[in-house]
Image: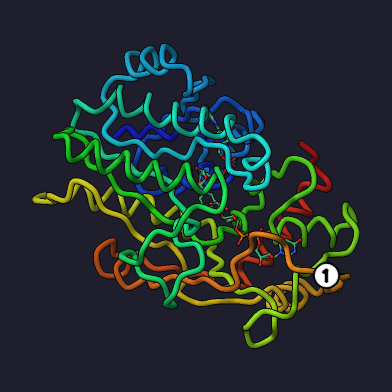
């Protein structure tokens, strides 16, 4: 069984990916420092997969800790590197916190494994495209100047990865550029756990519907889109988890010789904020309270991905639509209401 190190494996996307790794016959080894997750997620994962996966609580930005980890876990064949800070607004206020964690963690992992034939999957983001000139945006579209220190960590990380491959590293690396991950596992045992007031649309919607927050503000209805609200490519987190398995499988294919590559992970469709509000109401039967507010500074108007390359090369495509995204996110919110973390 292939042993896969999953950094940030108790986080939102990491926990769902651990489940898909087990479904596909891999042996996950989870690493997390619990800075944005909860140890109870390990038990929740165990309820889904039927056993408690191996877990190391450690800070990947600590070089010595990563060296000890690599020694303690021989035989790693793949790494999925989720661990990073991800709050865009916070990164503007605390850039060094972001540069320190996101870069040190990545570099420590690369240092530890660069001499080994290990397959590395990196969590990148559609944020690297900024506002694309052409939609849907393809992987070869230009990377736009970063809008935040967080976004900058993704852009520079991609450059670091390419440099490492060009230097003759034994690693193989794939960057996955996620669009907007939403939703939760079908079991409603794992999902997103936002700390404080959610900045992202879907967790705010579910918390508003359950009565934890007030009404939702739709940030602007005067954009150049059919209904005036911003458009995004929302992607179900379970589909994302499966894409990580596909990326590992691709790099394991005999004859695979691409050192570094990158793929868009989205559905290929743009959905507006107002369409999301409506889809939530329709798929859950809940009424949402919302008002139109001013634009949120830094928001791009519309972005959705061209997923041709992912379909063709990664052999992966999204299967779940907006209704499944909304109903699963809502089921998770309801689970949390009766089983608080
Ligand atoms: P998350 O915060 O839920 O998960 C990240 C996990 O990494 C957390 O469990 C956190 O405790 C852990 N972590 C952070 N720093 C660590 C460190 N130094 N050592 C050990 N563990 C550490 O975030 P997520 O939404 O699951 O995102 C996963 C990855 O995907 C991140 O790299 C993020 O930037 C990227 N991404 C996320 C989105 C999104 O909207 N969720 C979109 C694009 C890209
Ligand atoms: C989606 C849409 C808002 C909240 C962020 C990061 C990006 C990536 C994904 C990591 C926008 C609108 C939101 C609300 C609203 N993360 N909105 N009212 O901004 O597309 O992307 O997460 O890489 O880097 O920037 O996601 O969920 O915050 O917003 O109207 O209360 O919902 O304006 O149009 P975003 P989001």
Q: How crowded is mark 1: few (under 14 residues within 10 Å), some or many (20 or more)?
A: few
Residue identifier under label 1: 293
In this picture, residue 160 sits left or right of residue 337? left
Q: How many labels does the image show?
A: 1
Relative to 57, is 273 on the left or the right?
right
Residue 78 pos. (x, y %): 30, 36
What percent of the width, then of the height, locates residue 52? 52, 30
Q: Is residue 240 left or right of residue 276?
A: left
Instruction: State yes or no: Cβ of the residue under disc 1 lies below 8 Å from any atom of ligand 2.
Output: yes
Q: Residue at x 83, y 48 (%)?
A: 337
- Coordinates of residue 193 in the picture (x, y in percent): 69, 44
Q: In this view, does 215 lie above or below 69?
A: below
At 76% from the left edge and 53% from the top edge, which residue is drawn?
333
Q: Please give the name of the residue rendered at 57% of the width and 37% of the height, measured from the top-left corner.
A: 85
Tell me the residue at 47%/40% (across/down).
Answer: 82
For this rendering, which residue is in front, 188 or 51? 188
**Residue furthest out toward the front:** 145
């Amino acid at each position: 069984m292939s042993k896969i190190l999953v950094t940030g494996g108790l986080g939102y996307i990491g926990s769902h990916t651990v489940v898909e790794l087990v479904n596909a016959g891999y042996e996950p080894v989870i690493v997390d420092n619990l800075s944005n997750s909860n140890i109870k997620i390990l038990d929740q994962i165990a309820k889904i997969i039927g056993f408690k996966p191996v877990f190391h609580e450690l800070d990947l930005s600590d070089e010595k800790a990563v060296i000890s980890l690599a020694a303690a876990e021989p035989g790693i064949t793949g790494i999925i590197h989720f661990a990073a800070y991800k709050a865009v607004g916070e990164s503007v206020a605390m850039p060094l916190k972001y540069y320190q964690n996101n870069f040190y963690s990545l570099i420590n992992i690369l240092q530890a494994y660069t001499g080994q034939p290990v397959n590395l999957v990196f969590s990148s983001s559609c944020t690297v495209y900024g506002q694309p000139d052409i939609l849907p945006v393809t992987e070869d579209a230009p990377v736009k100047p970063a809008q935040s220190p967080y976004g900058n960590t993704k852009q520079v990380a991609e450059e670091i990865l390419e440099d490492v491959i060009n230097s003759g590293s034994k690693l193989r690396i794939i960057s996955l550029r996620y669009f907007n991950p939403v939703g939760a596992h079908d079991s409603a045992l794992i999902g997103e756990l936002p700390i404080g007031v959610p900045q992202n649309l879907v967790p705010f919607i579910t918390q508003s519907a359950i009565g934890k927050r007030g009404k939702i503000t739709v940030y602007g209805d005067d954009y150049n889109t059919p209904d005036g609200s911003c458009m995004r490519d929302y992607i179900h987190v379970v589909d994302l988890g499966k894409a990580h398995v596909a990326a590992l499988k691709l790099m394991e294919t005999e004859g695979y010789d691409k050192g570094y590559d990158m793929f868009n992970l989205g559905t290929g469709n743009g959905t507006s904020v107002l369409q999301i509000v409506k889809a939530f109401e329709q798929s859950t039967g809940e009424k949402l309270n919302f008002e139109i507010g001013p634009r949120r500074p830094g928001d791009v108007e519309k972005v959705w991905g061209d997923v041709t390359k992912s379909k063709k090369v990664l052999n992966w495509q999204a299967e779940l639509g907006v209704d499944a995204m909304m109903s699963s996110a809502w089921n998770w919110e309801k689970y949390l209401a009766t089983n608080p973390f």
